Amino acid sequence: MVIRDPVHGDIELSALEQAVLDLPDVQRLRGIKQLGTASYVYPGALHTRFDHSLGACALAHRMLEGLRRQGTPVPADLEDLIGVGALLHDVTHVPFGHTLEDERRLFPRHDKGDRMSRLLKGALGEALEKLGILGEIAGLLGEAPGHLPGWAGEIIASTLDADLLDYLRRDSRFTGLAQDYDDRVFRYFTVADDHLALRMARHGMDRPDARSEVVQLLRMRYFLTERVYYHHTKVVAGAMISKAVELAMQAQWLTEPELLHLNDWTLLDRLEQPGSPPGARHLAQGLARRRLLKRGYVLSASSLDESERAALVGLYHDSGTRRAEAEAVLASELGVSPEEVIVYCPALTVMKEARAWVETASGLRRLNDPASAACAEISALEARYAGLWRFYVFTPEAVAGRAAELASGYFGHPGEYAPSVK
């Protein structure tokens, strides 16, 4: 089976991969946008988790070609299993998953909770069992002890993996941002101590060209985070969806397991239905008409040191109760409906890709190891990445100016953002 992909060209799937691609749990991903609410800013960002899963599968095969070229034996049956694992790596995603999981923390992350184990005990697991690969796939995806090599799972999910290599290109393409990396990077992958690593040395000497290619991947990751993933309009739209879902769950109108049977559109439709909790319905209708809340109060890493940021994270990210209290107090003082004030406090930003394994002239180490030749460049990128952290209070535009004053007193830090007055 050959599928034409707008990013990678023709993607050829094996019979096993085709059988897995056609499973209902994978086909559901056609209705879940890869970038969630980014289309409120970049209208072309309508690509889906399904598209991305196909791309991750294609790039897993390219990485395996690179490994074979430098001498790592990759049996055909193992390659097939890795391809299937890449197709399934996002199967636990719910609509607007990163927003609900990472930002509002309504449930565990898709790759940390029990969703995959539930799916593997249900229809998906039955289908994989019929194909004779359930045990191997469960091992590859970290759901069971496995006998396959550790590096095989790291191709699917680690730091610099098939997932990252696809979404860097795909997200750039569909947001219209001119960013890319060189295909030469596929020649640098190697296996060392059962880890997937990047070979940054040759003939006993470190290679500046390899280092540059790896640093470019992290620069792309930073650029997309700055321009797309943390764009304030994307953030506020996501915050509105997550609060709507939270209110719907509190009213028992919606449960986490139900989200695995919904896509972006059916979730929003459900939230807008008569009978939906009024606050959730109001927020969903605002999203449908692009009547978004506005920034009233903003804090950033430029005005808070790391300990001050960590304190806010502990209060308003780790604790949904404290966040809800703050939202209720501010809404009351502003004279608006409770759902119209949203406190957005993300976790501290960490560039996990900087911990990729690299094989250097002095041995295997992490990319951001102080002894790494690339450490200075990597450290600078990590610092810039950490500096993207923002704390927001979103409100209706009419009260945004007043919200800035109230929030400054409530949170104990003067806000940095001056809402425009009309």
Image (tube, rainbow, N blue to C red):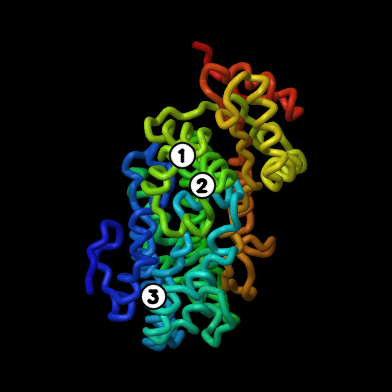
Query: Which residue is rendered at x = 74% and y = 45% of the image?
Result: 314
Q: Say whether disc 1 or disc 2 marks the residue closer to the N-terminus.
A: 2
Relative to residue 202, is residue 260 depicted above or below? above
Q: Name the residue under label 2.
A: 253
Mark number displayed over residue 83? 3
Instruction: Residue at 39%, 53% (x, y): give it.
Output: 263
Q: Is residue 274 left or right of residue 406?
A: left
Choose the circle earlier in sequence order: 3 or 2.
Answer: 3
Q: Is residue 356 above or below residue 204?
A: above
Q: Crowding at label 3, few (<14), some or many (≥20) Cα neighbours within 10 Å?
A: many
| Marks 3 and 2, how far apart at CA | 37 Å
Q: Where is residue 1 in the image (x, y as percent from the top left)?
A: 23, 74
Report which quarter residue 205 is drawn in: bottom right
CB under 8 Å between discs 1 and 2 = yes
Q: Position of residue 385 (x, y in %)?
A: 59, 46
For label 3, the SS is helix
Mark 2 Cα-neighbour bin, 10 Å: few <14, some 14–19, many ≥20: some
Label 1: which secondary element = loop
Q: Which of marks 3 and 2 is in front?
A: 2
Q: Position of residue 150 (x, y in %)?
A: 56, 80
Identified at 54% across, 67% down, the residue is 158
Q: Return the residue found at the far top.
A: 422
Q: What residue lies at 35% left-to-right and 67% top-to-bottom?
A: 24
Give the distance between the C-alpha atoms of the residues marked 1 and 3, in whole angstroms. Answer: 43 Å
Q: Is residue 367 above or below residue 328?
A: below
The three-letter code of the residue at mark 3 reads Gly
| Mark 2 residue type | Trp
Whether the residues at callouts 3 and 2 have beta carbons within 8 Å, the answer is no
- Please, what secondary structure does the residue beneath circle 2 have? loop
